[in-house]
Image (cartoon, rainbow, N blue to C red):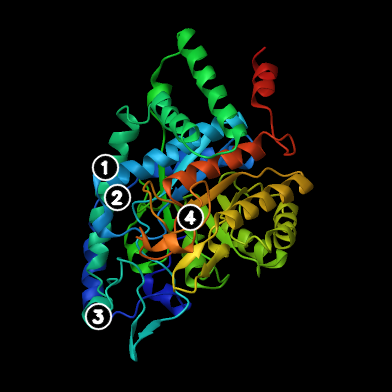
Amino acid sequence: MSEPIPSLAELHALGAAQQPAYPDPDAVAKVVAELRNRPPLVFAGECDDLRGRIAEVAAGRSFLLQGGDCAETFETVTAGNIKNKLKVLLSMAVVLTYAAQVPVLKVGRIAGQYAKPRSRDTETRGGVTLPAYRGDAVNALAFEPDARRPDPRRLLEVYNHSAATLNLLRAFVKGGFADLRAMHNWNADFVHNSNVDSRYEELSDEISRALAFMVACGVDNDQFRTVDFYSSHEALLLEYEHSLTRIDSRTGAPYNTSAHLVWAGERTRQPDGAHIAYLSRLRNPLGLKVGPKTTGADARELVERLDPDCEPGRLTIISRMGAGYVRDALPPIIEAVEATGRKVAWVCDPMHGNTFETATGYKTRAFSQVADELNGFFDVHHELGTWPGGVHVELTGDDVTECVGGVDELNEADLANRYETACDPRLSRNQSLELAFLIADRLTDGRIHRVNPVQEFQAEDF
């Protein structure tokens, strides 16, 4: 049985980073009490299933694709937006599955990613200083005193919108929307109508022939039409995460039932801090973000706290280094963690370390730098003989203009056309698909260490 979860008061006494300064403690207490009585959003058995699948990633027998909005907003919780994000992720997964020849584990930054850490507590415009926007879970984006005042009742809206999102996602992935052939048709349309490398067209044509061959052979079962899809978000707001923690009736272990996987961010991973103390007691699979200032010793201490039993599938380490740092900063972290005997899932977040501001004030990312960090991630794992287990991307299913470069050759002047993010810039639909083909190229270049699942199957069953 797991150790009991510390109380909220005990967690705050440890020094909880990145928490809102709520003006009314009584209002916070009422919201927490109400959330504790709400039904779980996910179930313990689903979290256990995901932990088992992440163990396959860690063993080199699967690849993890994790993606979604930087920060979800209440107004974008529509059927169309949810469908488009899912469509992009599933289309990317088709390409990656064929390239890697291993299953692709699909996890969304969705149904709970409503809060964001900030580098400053306040924002000043024209001599007026207000609290920083910390996501719809805390306050509103409008630069007005009432909008920026932290409101704990917004946590109830996070729950309601997350429940609606999960309900629709479950209907989509089990109701035929995820049909493998339909997803690939979208990819094929993308490569044949875009200025992409000819290698990507060749790969798309290969997948088309493979699907046609399977259909001709009579392979047409539920695996063509349904997929498993999991939710994740940063476990940032302790009042929300703590109030949705439930004790599993089967085992007596605590689970965070707001998402299948929750992670500690770069700003909240203090080894003796509140977030690590809370996460270490959960039975959910956990994520840990590490940046370029993380040392091997730092990483070792954190994995020992979060995964004391060396449990396969327990921990996913998400590196967010920046293109200029990944080749130097990542190897000592991998070596230190691998030396502990733990087999974690190694995942690359090529977005957060590559943000810059244009002369016109837009926060953006260059597709070329995103690609460079991913290539550095693969290069490091090739050199160390370890498995590059996945990618963690901020993306949308819409034709936004938030990141420069990519197949549509967006430049800084294009950013004003459809810059819609509430926080950090996301890859557009076409940039996301282009990234999938880029990753596929690395997965098929013969320079990565992997387990051959076909050989394993033959050895065990024949």
Q: Nearer the viewer, mark 1 or mark 4?
A: 4
Q: Nearer the viewer, residue 4 or 347?
A: 347
Tell me which amino acid carries mark 1: Asn
Mark 2 vs 4, N-terminal side: 2
**Residue at numbered disc 2:** 40
Mark 3, other Cα within 10 Å: few <14 / some 14–19 / many ≥20: few
What x and y, as percent, mark residue 9?
38, 75
Dot 3 lies on which element? loop
The first of marks 3 and 4 along the sequence is 3
Q: Nearer the viewer, mark 2 or mark 4?
A: 4
Lower sequence index among marks 1 and 4: 1
> Sequence order check: which comes first, mark 1 or mark 2?
2
Query: Alpha carbon of mark 1 to alpha carbon of mark 4: how far?
Result: 35 Å
Give the numbered dot on residue 167.
Answer: 1
Residue visible at 61% across and 63% down in the picture: 302
Residue 144 image label: 3
In the picture of the structure, the residue carrying the numbered disc 4 is 410
Q: CA distance from mark 2 to mark 4?
A: 42 Å
Given the current orientation, which residue lies at the most extreme bottom position?
127
Which residue type does callout 4 highlight? Leu
